[in-house]
Amino acid sequence: MTPFSLRIFVADGDPEGLRLVERSNWIGKAIVFPRTLFPTIRQRAELGQTGVYLLLGPREDGEGDQLYIGEGDPIGARLRSHFAQKDFWTQAICFVASHGQLNKAHVQFLEASLIRLAKEVKRVPLDNAHQPTDPSLSEADLADMSVFLSNMLSMLPVLGVNAFERAASKSAERSAPMLMVKGKGVSAKGFESTQGFVVKSGSEAVTDCVPSMELHVRGMYELRQELIRNGVLAKKDDRYVYSQDYVFSSPSTAAAVILGRSANGRIEWKDAAGRTLKELQTLAADT
């Protein structure tokens, strides 16, 4: 990965208010703001430009976030419509470029690419009903927009959005100890990464949860149900199997989804020598 710097301008002095985010040596700009500010900032010049935007907010069941991805020419008109008609979102992140650098086909490409990637990664459910078709772009425009997309994707985790992050690379996997968790006839492999805890494709999970999981660790239970619905956990004989590498926010959440009960991931995950993740972390901190 290539290092980069971001310049964040807090336009109204409120760290949670309007923020303008620029990346070094890039024509693009991100505009980040809470929904409550939209009536105040809707006349800003950035919202009069062509761009792509993300709307984020809690799911209807209250467990985790959902995401809507859109494009606009200009984006302000689309945001006005969503302000009136979409209730779930609480934050918007918009990407525009220097005047005239993005056109309708460009942002249609960005929108379609983001929706496709979010569906593949399956980390955050989408409010989008359909997958847009890719517009026809020249070879040069396609190359330019691929770079624009790459820069957006590298910025979004810094802005708190992990909906598009794939599991860690092979090099990251090789640099971390591979860990295992076992229980109720199933076994799984995973490792820690900068993104979170990665459970490897082919790992197993129990078919049924203990009744107390739904009552006492509701968020983990709902996440497990979501992974079953979207195919990350696929039924195979008497167990579920991970159809892809999947990144969890913590080793405890990963272990709970696999074992179907609340779990302390720092104790449950162990290396080939039987050392717990807690022991390995303590050892690493002391050396």
Image: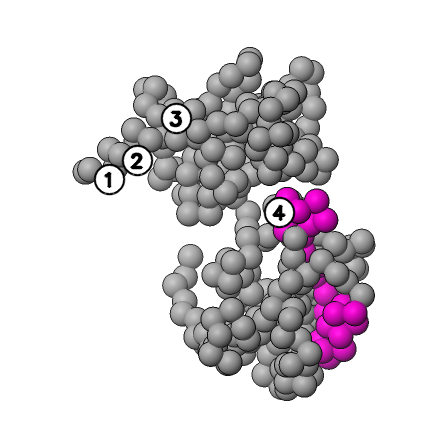
Check disc 2 and give the amino acid type.
Answer: Gln
Rounded to the nearest angstrom, the CA distance separating label 3 from label 2 is: 11 Å
Residue topped by disc 3: 267
Q: Nearer the viewer, mark 3 or mark 2?
A: 3
- The residue identified by callout 2 is 281
**Are the residues tagged 2 and 1 within 8 Å (C-beta)?**
yes
In which quarter of the view is residue 136 placed?
A: bottom right
Q: Distance between the residues labelled 2 and 4?
A: 28 Å
Q: Where is residue 172 in the image (x, y as percent from the top left)?
A: 41, 43
Identify the disc placed on residue 262.
none
Residue at (24% x, 40% y) in the render: 285
Q: Residue 282 in the image: state x and y as whole percent.
A: 26, 34
Q: Are marks 1 and 3 in contact (CB under 8 Å)?
A: no
- Residue 285, which numbered label? 1
* Magenta span includes 238: no
Name the amino acid, label 3.
Ile
In the rendered image, the vertical position of residue 75 relative to residue 185, given as above or below: below
Decide if residue 116 is in sight here: no
Where in the figure is residue 67, as x and y percent of width and height? 67, 56
Q: Residue at x 41, y 38 (%)?
A: 192
The amino acid type, in three-letter code, at marker 1 is: Ala
